[in-house]
Amino acid sequence: MVTKCQVIIVGAGPAGLCLGLALAKFNIQSIILEKETEITADPRGVYLTGDAVRILYDLGVGDELEYVGHPAENVQMHRSTYGAPSFLTLRPGTTNALEQAVPEGLQQMQPRLETALRKRIHATSCCRLWTGCTVTARVSEEPPRIQFRDASDEVQEVEGQWLIGADGKAGVVRKQFLEPTSGIKQQAGLHFYDGTSIASNLYISLPTPQSHPKFELWALGYTSEQVYDLFWPKGWHFCCPPGMPTAGGRFGPHSERLWRHEFRLDKEVSEQESEAALWEHILPMVTLQGDRHRQVQFRAPVQYPRDCIQVLRCRPYRFTHRVVNRWFDKRTILIGDAAHVFPPFAGQGIASGLRDAHQLAWRLAVVLERFPPDQPMPSWAQALLEAWARERRSSVDTTAYLSISLGRMSSAPPNILARLGFRIKHCMDRSPELANGIDPLVKVERQGFTKVRDGCFVKKYRGGVRMAQIHVTDGLTGKTLLSDRLLGGSSAMTLLVICDAKESGQSVSQAKRAVKNANLPAGVLDEDAIIVYDPHAQDDVQHHAAEASKEKSPETVALYRPRTFDATSPEYRRCGGYDAEAYIRRVGKKSRFVIVRSDFFVFACLKNEHDLATCLGILASKVGGG
């Protein structure tokens, strides 16, 4: 028997699960086939970037993230060990650098992340997750039909309109289906990296005066928690003992007391040998001569009790940077590690997989059911996916460069010029504006895809930038929600009408007229996806809701206003300086209409109805309409 669905996803890692959830927002039926029956506990990614956190909130798992990890606190560069003074400290989430309302990074437990994503998958009726399924063959390319053995070892087949390979760097979709027939393979990335590291996950228990009565620090008045904080400091740390660049830090909820420790070891070692190498490397790092924060020198070196360090997982990994030469062939597409692999320095592996999926989902929603699944793609659909591939390749190249640059900084002590530069940066960090002005991550965030040629946006009209994220207030109900929820309907695009709510009638009429005349295909952008955004904060929400309910008319559409917070509020502190004005600043204060893709990127910012009609015509040509 052949099971049919719209999209087949092979692989239930973060990228595959994210795609299933993103497609479900458009009511697209998908099946995820996963080889393993349980979530693997291998030491894998422990960091989520700010935009990845934002995507997870958009997919409905934001409330689960406290269970998954803790917000990133600081990143410190040390010359030798974690206990040495840092020559450079980065503080994500302290300057509102990304102009978003959710944490700018998360030290996470990947098994818990996948558990949260699976829980969300099971709650939707659009996506089915089948575990214990080993894909064995591709029966046909158009439409994609694949054969697999299920958990009972019975041969089954599933057919869809699209096949997505999210099954990792050695997955069957690329290695067995695409490489032999279309020549798609991973090649060295634009920025070279290749090295072997030992990666371990450690559980740290607390010594007590009862369990370790002879431990030297009790006599100096230390508590168990203070000992833990001294030897296993908060944040993420890079250091460079001779020849062994090292990274480590806490991950998961603080209460779990988990520590990731990885160090470069460019020689072949077995899994058994790797644990011996770990102890040889880490014990000197948790042996301290004193406490520089208290300015206390110990009478003799003090080592954290070895029996309080439990190795959960430890194994060698070869890290490299590779990217596919093509991202798709016919109706088979690659995302996540199947498309690219990263060096370990900046947590870009998981984040890039989530970006792949989130930015692909609305495109699949646009092309599905538009042409017979047994026929080749029309030129507009081919171009739409090629634009996705160009945007993704640009993002991969940029993040790989930043990741490798961070790794180089941690591979050797800084020279005189570098130390001078770090001192200047330390002084500039006292001003959020100056700190953000020299931060390369800020530049990448605000640049978005604007440097990508032939992306799915109109560069002339400020297209390609990513929308900022703020809290907004629903003009009718008074409820507060994240601004990304404005883009969360079943349409691929949303049209924001930016104007004073009391004078919105004419602008809304112009927007509806332009959308109607554009003759866009169903599901791209319709009148229900037009939203009024009044940039003036409304203090008296209840009064405005009452007034708005009296003024309903044929031109009434959803209305939202920015929500402001004072500096003492959790919302302000969460992102290090919440700024509601960032929403308009990112798209330009003179913009009256903004066409926004559901992946948070701007298609075009317009000042008048004529420009709006022009850009809707361009959009129609890109999605096979008009």
Image (cartoon, grey):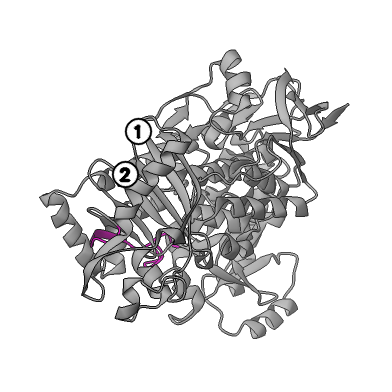
Numbered disc 1: secondary structure: loop
Q: Residue at (18%, 49%) from the top-left corner? A: 414
Q: Nearer the viewer, residue 551 or 73?
A: 73
> Closer to the N terminus: mark 2 or mark 1?
1
- Residue 25 - label: none
Q: Is residue 228 above or below residue 15?
A: below
Q: Going by the image, does 472 lie left or right of 576?
A: right
- Which residue corresponds to mark 1? 193
Q: Position of residue 578 (x, y in %)?
A: 45, 71
Q: Position of residue 363 (x, y in %)?
A: 63, 39
Q: Nearer the viewer, residue 533 or 590?
A: 533
Numbered disc 2: secondary structure: helix
In the picture as drawn, the residue positioned furthest to the top comes out as: 181
Residue 19 picture quarter = top right
Looking at the rendered structure, the number of numbered marks drawn on it comes to: 2
Q: Position of residue 499 (x, y in %)?
A: 55, 67
Q: Position of residue 27 (x, y in %)?
A: 76, 47
Q: Nearer the viewer, residue 620 or 203?
A: 203
Residue 294 picture quarter = bottom left
Amino acid carrying label 2: it is Gly
Q: Residues within 10 Å of mark 2 (few under 14, many from 20)?
A: many
Amino acid carrying label 1: it is Tyr
Specify whether residue 291 is in view. Answer: yes
- Which residue corresponds to mark 2? 407
Q: Are marks 2 and 1 in contact (CB under 8 Å)?
A: yes
The magenta segment? 82-99
The N terminus lies in which quarter of the figure? top right
**Main SS, magenta residues:** loop
How far apart in space, not on screen, are marks 2 and 1 (Cα)? Answer: 10 Å
The C terminus lies in which quarter of the figure? top right
Residue 482 picture quarter = bottom right
Q: Residue at (57%, 49%) from the top-left corner? A: 599
